[in-house]
Every structure is written in structure tokens, then in C-alpha cells.
Amino acid sequence: MQKQRVFSGVQPTGNLHLGNYLGAIKNFVDLQNKFECIYCIVDLHAITNRQDPKQLKSNIFETVASFIASGLDPEKSIIFNQASVSAHSELAWVFNCVARIGWMNRMTQFKEKAGANKENASVGLLVYPNLMAADILIYKATHVPVGEDQKQHLELTRDIAKKFNNDFKCENYFPIVQPLISEEISRVMSLKDGKKKMSKSDDSDYSRINLKDDKDLIDKKIKKAKTDSTPIPTKISELKNRDEAANLISIYSNINNVSVEKVLKEFGGKNFSTFKSKLSESVVEKICPIGEEIKKLLKDEGYLTGVLEKGAKKADLIAKSNIKEIYDIIGLAKFS
């Protein structure tokens, strides 16, 4: 039986961190053994905010290197950058004409990113959920791994698919994509503030663990990570309102593939200095080899270019076939 198809996209921000690994890439690696997987570096999404052209290109290579170093296999999964497959943009325009303005105005991420000065935000930032829907549906993906912050956009993708199928009387043409939500994956929060997501944009480098950090730096960051003076609890319910403690325990749980209950059973009643030492060992063991491999791959731009070119050819074959069908459905034609 043919595997079902997974699509996911990652923005090329460069310098990926532990949150990116535990929140997305680690899951991508697991999924490639169960599904037909398409992983896209969504560089068109990145330009909704101004980018330095040279840095953007560098970030694309670093994202590919991070994927491969973390265990994604270009022979098992299609890995490519969005701008190399023009059907993404073509279908996004079609969806601009299918989706409703009211739908865009309800997107909470636009409100957060645009802030108080939304009249000065780019049009791309407003309508990029339509491009996200196009990214998924141009491949007729059946499943998308999502975190809490992407659920609304996936729901929009489902609404667009239903409206297109209904408007053009082509029932079931676009699949109603299903979310893949792993119970083991949780948002990785800042090491300085357990209420804030771990982010590259945070001013303090000590708020995050970068995939290219060495052992000494990881040790320092975990030692300095914010906690509280109360010992580690023995029950999950006792982690309530202890955001920093819950974050570190969640990181340990995820990186070691053990339940939070098991972590609390092992460390409950102990102080955080003991726990941080063990956490540091686990993070170093997992992340340092990835970081070393990223650095090695970045020295071979020819190899990374080859991975992107091969992936783009595979993706383009699927996307071109589907965009032709879509154009036929809506009455458009290409005479070249």
C-alpha cells in the first residue's frame, strides 16, 4: 500500500536551535520511515520580512545542512527550497482568489507579527497563510506535523481545500489534510524565561542552545538556565506555575525519549544542580555530533546544492502535474 504523504516547511532563519530540533526536526526524522515525506525550506515565506540577500542564501544552506546532520535522508525524503518550484507561487495566487479577506484578518500570527503598525506590514505577511496552504496542497499532502502555533493555519488550509472543491465542483480533489500532533513533542521554551518560546531573535544567546554550540557552551548555558529554589517534584501536577522547571524537565524527557513521569521518578526531591548536570550530559551527547556534522557539511556547498537540485526536480514533477490539473479545473491554460 502506498505511503501517505507528509509535507512540512521550515523557514531558513539560520543557526537553528534546540527548540527547532526537538519541536520539529527530530519528528521529521521519525516520520520519514513511516510516510512519503516532503520537507521544504520556505524561503518565499522568509521574505515577508526584509532579508539580507547574501544571508538568506547562506541560511538556506545551513537549514539543509541541519536537516541532514539531524538524520534526514535525501534518498528517503524530498528536500528542496520553495523558490525552486514555481507551482507554489502559482497555486498561492489561485488561493488568494479562493480565500476570503475575513479569513486573513482572523489569523492571530499576522496580528502578532504586524503589531500595532499593521498598516505598514507587507501584503505578503497578511496573505502568507494562502501560500502555506499552497505549499501543502500542491502535493496533495494528507498529513502535516504541526505545533500549537500552526493549528490555525492548518485549519485555514482545510477551509481553502473545502471551498475550492465546492466552488469548482471537484469533490475530494484536494484532500482535507490531517494534523500530525505527537504527544511527546512540546514547545521548547527560553532558558531565561519559561513563558517565552526559545527563539533565535532573543537578545540573549543564553536563552537558547544552538545546534552548533560546543560542549563547554552548552554546559554554561544549562548551568545558568533559570530555575527556582524548590526541589524537583515527584508529580506532574506539582509542575504547575513552575514554568522554568517544567521546561528543563520537558527538554530532558524529549531528548532522552522518556516520559515526564519517569524523569520525575528519577529526580523527584533532588535539587536542580544535580539535574542540570545530567541534562547537560544528555544535550551534549545528542546535539554536539549534530553541530559537528553541520559544520562539516557547510564546507561542501557543492553537495548541499546537489541535494537541493535533486529534491527540487522530484518536487517539481509532482507539482507541475498537479498545477496543470488545477488550471484545467478552473479554466486556465498555458500555451507554451
Image (tube, rainbow, N blue to C red):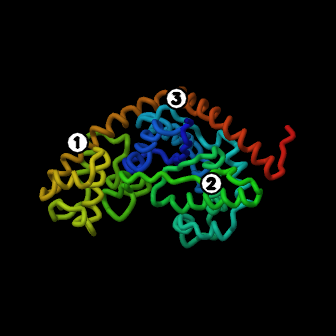
Q: CA distance from mark 2 to mark 1?
A: 40 Å
| Residue kind at label 3, given as amino acid type | Glu
Q: Which structural element holds mark 2?
A: helix
| Residue kind at label 2, given as amino acid type | Ala
Category of crowding for the residue at label 1, using alpha-carbon neighbours closer than 10 angstroms: few (below 14), some (14–19), many (at least 20): few
Percent position of residue 336, x then y: 85, 37
User: Residue shown at 54%/44% (left/top)?
Assistant: 6
Q: Which mark is residue 281?
A: 1
Between 324 and 35, the one nearer to me in the picture: 35
Between 60 and 326, the one nearer to me in the picture: 326
Percent position of residue 134, x then y: 65, 51
Percent position of residue 154, x then y: 56, 57
Q: Which residue is mark 3?
A: 75
User: Residue shown at 45%/30% (left/top)?
Assistant: 297
Sooner in the amino-acid sequence: mark 3 or mark 1:
3
Q: CA distance from mark 3 to mark 1?
A: 32 Å
Sooner in the amino-acid sequence: mark 2 or mark 3:
3
Q: Which mark is residue 133?
A: 2
Sooner in the amino-acid sequence: mark 2 or mark 1:
2
Q: Which structural element holds mark 3?
A: loop
Q: Is residue 236 shown above or below 27?
A: below
User: Residue shown at 59%/33% (left/top)?
Assistant: 311
Picture quadrant where residue 167 is located: bottom right
